[in-house]
């Protein structure tokens, strides 16, 4: 019971209920007894917390009562930052908007899929068509360049078939360079057979190529009946050509109309002999059976204006055949066996020496 | 964005002296005057009207105690002080709930009030310990203690209320109750 009495004393001391004597005695005890002093402090502090707690509870009740009277809703609406109308729309309609968006996306994807725009090949096709375009452009350019080189003439290039003629009995054949340009292989055919050849010499500037028959079945041609005219032909001279514009040989005749080619090109004769694609590379002969040129091209748009390379350039080309070629320099025929014969007889004699050139 | 509130705002000194004189109307005027400001802060920063109420009442208590202790300096504005405390409390609450995005939408200027908020947090902890200790104490102890220590009733009144035949029995009962309350209070960690 000692402790209970002490507590009562502490409470009476703290609340000021003690009279002066009691107070003095208690303070005396407090200074002498540290334990009592500690109890006083402890109790004071604890009761303090208890009282403050009570006050807090009471204050909270008062605040709650005040809060009850406030129109919280109205204040909330007043102070809320009004979201933008678009956010409002989204809040109220987001499910509908989502569905609409999904449908739209699906529709776009489906359209893309159906029209094949999603296909990766489309890019590839585009690319390949681009390549095609570029190819076309390039070939057009090549054509233009060739046309310029050759004096703006249309060449029977697309036929891949032309004419050639023998210049020596061992199987050297001259033809137009443009026929065999970029050829895989070149064959020649005459009434006796078809023979494989190789290109021995080519000269794009003069549009001359010289082939050599390499076929094992080839046994030789015999003496060439015509000669090659070194000098220039005469205007108005009768000339003819013999060649393969189609599968059967064709004879065509006319006159030498100019000693200059297109735009004064001195390489060529201008002739009125009818020429077709396929005549290219064929021989142009005068009435005595001299080869005076190689049929080359015709002028686009004007009938009967055709061109043949002068034979002097053929002779130069023959001289220029590289010496390391398998064959020795061809010995050109100097004896013309056609002179004095009629054209019919001439043709009969020379038909085996004129070849169809087939390019693969 | 910053709305000014048209309610007749009491002057700071009116409030301070009103609270020092235990004027009921002073607290009410204070409460009504600044609640919208705090509501604006809370509900525009991921809070609800109930959060606003909790935070605001806490801040009012901080201010009330500060005024009662005579620590509130009249040269600092009540409004700024309340806003700062609410802001600080709300930041704490948000980070406790892991809802703080790192960016608070402010509506008023504010001053540092960390010390006040920390003191308040410590007191709150003691009070919640006291509350649960009293809760565990049970009747009639709880009422005796509350009547005597909080409501400052005399032992005579308490005797009559509880029908004790003499004051000594009541005192003994009160002594036992207080010892148990202390035990319950200090047991909690």
Image: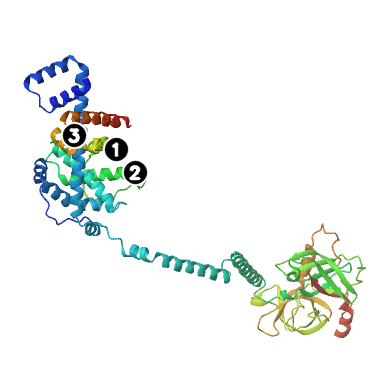
Determine whether label 2 and label 3 are within 8 Å by CB: no
The alpha-carbon separation of the residues under discs 2 and 1 comes to 26 Å
Chain where mark 1 sits:
B
The alpha-carbon separation of the residues under discs 2 and 3 comes to 52 Å
Is disc 3 surrounded by few (<14), some (14 to 19) or many (20+) residues within 10 Å? some
Q: Mark 1 against mark 3, which lies toward the viewer? A: 3
Which corner quadrant of the image does residue A268 belong to?
A: bottom right
The residue carrying mark 2 is B95
**Label ID, residue A78:** none
Closer to the chain start, of discs 2 and 1, is 2
Instruction: Compare residues A250 and B14 and report the one nearer the observer.
Output: B14
The alpha-carbon separation of the residues under discs 1 and 3 comes to 27 Å
- Residue A228 visible in this rendered orientation of the protein: no
Instruction: Compare residues B103 and B150 and report the one nearer the observer.
Output: B150
Q: Secondary structure at mark 2?
A: helix
Closer to the chain start, of discs 1 and 3, is 1
Q: Is residue B56 left or right of residue A249?
A: left
Is disc 1 surrounded by few (<14), some (14 to 19) or many (20+) residues within 10 Å? few
Which corner quadrant of the image does residue A191 belong to?
A: bottom right
**Label ID, residue B164:** 3
Q: Is residue A301 above or below residue A48?
A: below
**Residue A152 on image: x %, y %:** 64, 75
The residue carrying mark 1 is B132
**Residue B16 on image: x %, y %:** 11, 42
Closer to the chain start, of discs 2 and 3, is 2
Q: Secondary structure at mark 3?
A: loop
């Amino acid at each position: 019971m000692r402790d209970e009495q002490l507590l009562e004393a502490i409470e009476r001391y703290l609340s000021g209920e003690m009279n002066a004597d009691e107070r003095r005695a208690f303070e005396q005890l407090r200074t002498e007894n540290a334990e009592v002093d500690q109890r006083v402090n402890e109790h004071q502090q604890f009761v303090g917390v208890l009282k403050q707690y009570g006050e807090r509870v009471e204050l909270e009740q008062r605040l709650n009562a005040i809060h009850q009277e406030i129109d919280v809703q109205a204040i909330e609406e007043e102070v809320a930052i009004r979201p933008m109308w678009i956010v409002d729309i989204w809040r109220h309609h987001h499910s509908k908007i989502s569905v609409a968006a999904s449908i739209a996306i699906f529709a776009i994807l489906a359209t893309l899929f159906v029209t094949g725009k999603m296909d990766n090949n489309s890019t590839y096709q585009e690319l390949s068509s681009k390549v095609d375009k570029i190819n076309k452009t390039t070939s057009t350019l090549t054509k233009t360049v060739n046309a310029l080189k050759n004096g703006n003439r249309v060449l029977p290039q697309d036929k891949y078939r032309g004419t050639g003629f023998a210049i020596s009995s061992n199987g050297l054949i001259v033809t137009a360079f443009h026929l065999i340009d970029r050829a895989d292989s070149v064959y020649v055919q005459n009434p006796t057979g078809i023979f494989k050849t190789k290109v021995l010499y080519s000269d794009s500037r003069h549009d001359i190529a010289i082939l050599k028959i390499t076929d094992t079945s080839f046994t030789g041609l015999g003496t060439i009946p015509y000669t090659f005219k070194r000098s220039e032909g005469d205007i108005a001279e009768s000339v003819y050509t013999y060649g393969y514009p189609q599968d059967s040989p064709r004879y065509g005749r006319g006159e030498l109309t100019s000693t200059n080619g297109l735009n004064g090109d001195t390489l060529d004769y201008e002739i009125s002999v009818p020429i077709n694609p396929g005549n290219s590379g064929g021989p142009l002969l005068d009435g005595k059976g001299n080869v005076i040129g190689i049929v080359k091209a015709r002028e686009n748009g004007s009938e009967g204006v055709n061109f043949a390379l002068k034979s002097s350039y053929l002779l130069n080309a023959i001289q220029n055949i590289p010496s390391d070629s398998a064959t020795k320099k061809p010995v050109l025929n100097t004896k013309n066996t056609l002179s004095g014969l009629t054209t019919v007889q001439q043709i009969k004699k020379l038909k085996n020496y004129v070849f169809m050139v087939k390019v693969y | 964005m910053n709305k000014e509130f048209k309610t007749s705002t009491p002057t700071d000194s009116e409030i301070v002296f009103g609270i020092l004189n235990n004027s009921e109307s002073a607290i009410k005027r204070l409460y009504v005057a600044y609640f919208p400001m705090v509501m604006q802060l809370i509900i525009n920063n991921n809070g609800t009207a109930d959060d606003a109420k909790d935070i605001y009442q806490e801040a009012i208590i901080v201010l009330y105690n500060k005024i009662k202790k005579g620590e509130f300096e009249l040269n600092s504005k009540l409004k700024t002080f309340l806003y700062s405390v609410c802001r600080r409390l709300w930041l704490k609450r948000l980070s406790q709930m892991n809802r703080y995005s790192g960016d608070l939408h402010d509506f008023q200027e504010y001053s540092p009030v960390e010390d006040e908020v920390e003191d308040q947090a410590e007191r709150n902890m003691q009070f919640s310990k006291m509350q649960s200790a009293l809760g565990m104490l049970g009747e009639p102890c709880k009422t005796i203690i509350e009547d005597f220590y909080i409501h400052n009733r005399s032992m005579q009144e308490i005797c009559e209320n509880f029908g004790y035949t003499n004051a000594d029995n009541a005192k003994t009962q009160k002594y036992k109750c207080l010892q148990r309350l202390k035990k319950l209070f200090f047991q909690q960690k």
